[in-house]
Image (spheres, rainbow, N blue to C red):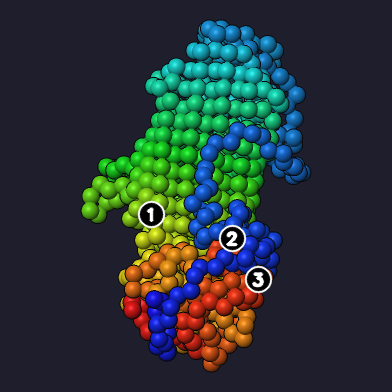
Amino acid sequence: MVCLIVAFIVVACVEDSPISDYNEGQIPTMQGGMPGQGGMHGQGGFGGQTSGTDDLEEFDVTIDTSALSEHETIPVEDEDYVENSDFTTKISVSYDNTTAVVSGSVEGVEVTVDGADVTVNSSVKGIEYVLTGTSSDGCFKVYSDKKFKLTLNGLTLTNNDGAAINIQSKKRIFVELADGTTNNLTDGSKYNKVDDEDMKGTLFSEGQLIFSGKGILNVTGKGKHGIASDDYVRFRPGNVINITASAGNGVKANDAIIIEGGVLNVEVSDTASKGLSSDGYVEVNGGRTTVITTGDGEYEEDENDTSACAGIKSDSIFTMNGGELWLKSTGSGGKGISSDQDIVINDGTLRIITTGKRFTYSSSLHSSAKGIKSDTDVTINGGDIRVKTTGGEGSEGIEAKGVMTINGGIVEVSAYDDALNSASHMYLNGGNIYAYSSNNDGIDSNGNLYVKGGIILAIGSSQPESGIDANEEEGYSVEISGGTLLSMGGGTSYPNAQSSQASVSFNAGIENGNYLSINTEGKSLMAYEVTRTYGGGATFLISSPDIKNGTSYTINSGGSFTGGSYWHGLIIGATVSKEGSTLGNVNATATAGGNNRR
């Protein structure tokens, strides 16, 4: 038996019909800007999930060391590009196990060698240092008043008591990986500190570090970070850089981390370590960056707070304009992206997985796993985003401690806790949004929820959780003025009096895998392949520009359809080829009565 309770009309219970396949195996066409145009139902890709969470459940994050084919335009007069500087004098250092041989001499440059420890003191400009060979107990250290170029040309260098490369210069350093070469740097598990000098990682610089070239660099951090700068770090197209750090962060910068391109793979295992950590901002414009963290959270006594791992940690703004980010965190409290300020995603491909449970130090001090977390606002203007958080209580997909705004892009989230959560208002203005929570709300706005455009699927768990929740207990509500919305959960927040777009709401006891559709005059305005079974029935809220205020619509269970657009079980604009069982009729209205908890 299937029971339908309409927000405005109560209709009788009717017998359910057998489940029928959508489109009877034919190919649905994708319209209205939905992803995966022309996708085959039942196959992978955005156009063909057999159930609402297939692609979210199946994707994984793994290290890929293959190079990218990238195009780069060199900005004229930009000082961050080695092509705009002249390095006419070359000094070569060739390592041979316990010794090092230096070739080339320049007035103003003093090079001293102690076994395989090489130290440079320079006061002149235009110098390129070329490092080759192998040493299991050596280092390269530079003091310089001027910027310089450092070329790694088939270098394997291990320093057992500190950084392999230690640059005590606040100037711009160009690190070029020679084409076709593989270079390896390893630090010691303990560092012998020299005077008051910083030495924070396997490859450390007081100044800016700018990586270029088409070689490979493997960095192992045993004692501290992998790559560290007291200024900023910039990665350019062509690089393949692989970092493994067991006692610190993969990349640590004071001012900024900027990824223009290249391949960057980071694996960190230390407690509360970060793949990329910047005390300033982080900006991703291209390339393919993969970060895997495995450490658990910890209590920081100095801060009287908890800390956890993160693929990317920005103390300022995080911005993504392009490229690929693949982030995975498996430890307790681990996060994909964590920012103390705004997170802005304009374009690019983003994949995030967290599997860790909440890290708890005390009842008031804990850290929960999150896919994307901002301490202020989250704004998504475009891009292709998938987030999966499975670890348990507090494991939210995307969280803004301020306002969340989605203007475009593809946003797909499967979370144990809230899929989308904002501490303040939430604006859904465009894009294709799929928000699935296995144990809480699909979309949870602790301010007003404004739905103005886009295609939105919000799936929450059973009572007392909701498909959409606008915190009505505090006086907030939902305002719908555009877009296509289907919300399903144990309850719902209803549109307020300011809503200008009509909606229908009802409760239906319909089982997982069956289609529920809203039809009129033989045409399906919307159908949905239900992805879970709710005891006591699910509350649906459906809104679309095609739903007309005051019009009566038929709600069906089962049936089959041709044409239309298919995405995560949602079918829009299909023709009904086979009627299912009629559950009842509903009247559309711009405002729906009721409250958030049935």
Q: Is residue 55 left or right of residue 332?
A: right
**Cα distance in 3D space between marks 3 and 1:** 38 Å
Depth check, front residue: 302 or 362: 362
Q: Are marks 1 and 2 in contact (CB under 8 Å)?
A: no
The amino acid marked with disc number 1 is Ser
The amino acid marked with disc number 3 is Thr
Depth check, front residue: 517 or 228: 517
Percent position of residue 460, x then y:
41, 66
Closer to the chain start, of discs 3 and 1, is 1
The residue that mark 2 highlights is: 410
| Label 1 packing within 10 angstroms: few (<14), some (14-19), many (20+) | many
Closer to the chain start, of discs 1 and 2, is 1
Q: Residue at x 45, y 35 (%)?
A: 268
Q: Residue at x 63, y 80 (%)?
A: 523
Percent position of residue 454, x then y:
59, 70
| Label 3 packing within 10 angstroms: few (<14), some (14-19), many (20+) | many
**In this rendering, is residue 241 above or below 17?**
above
Q: Is residue 424 visible?
A: no
Q: Is residue 322 visible?
A: yes
Q: Which mark is residue 177?
A: none
The residue that mark 1 highlights is: 395
Percent position of residue 374, x then y:
45, 56
Quadrant including the C terminus: bottom left
Percent position of residue 51, x then y:
52, 60
For numbered disc 2, what is the local secondary structure? strand
**Cα distance in 3D space between marks 1 and 2:** 21 Å
**Cα distance in 3D space between marks 2 and 3:** 24 Å
For numbered disc 1, what is the local secondary structure? loop
Q: Nearer the viewer, mark 3 or mark 1?
A: 3
- Quadrant housing residue 120: top right
The residue that mark 3 highlights is: 562
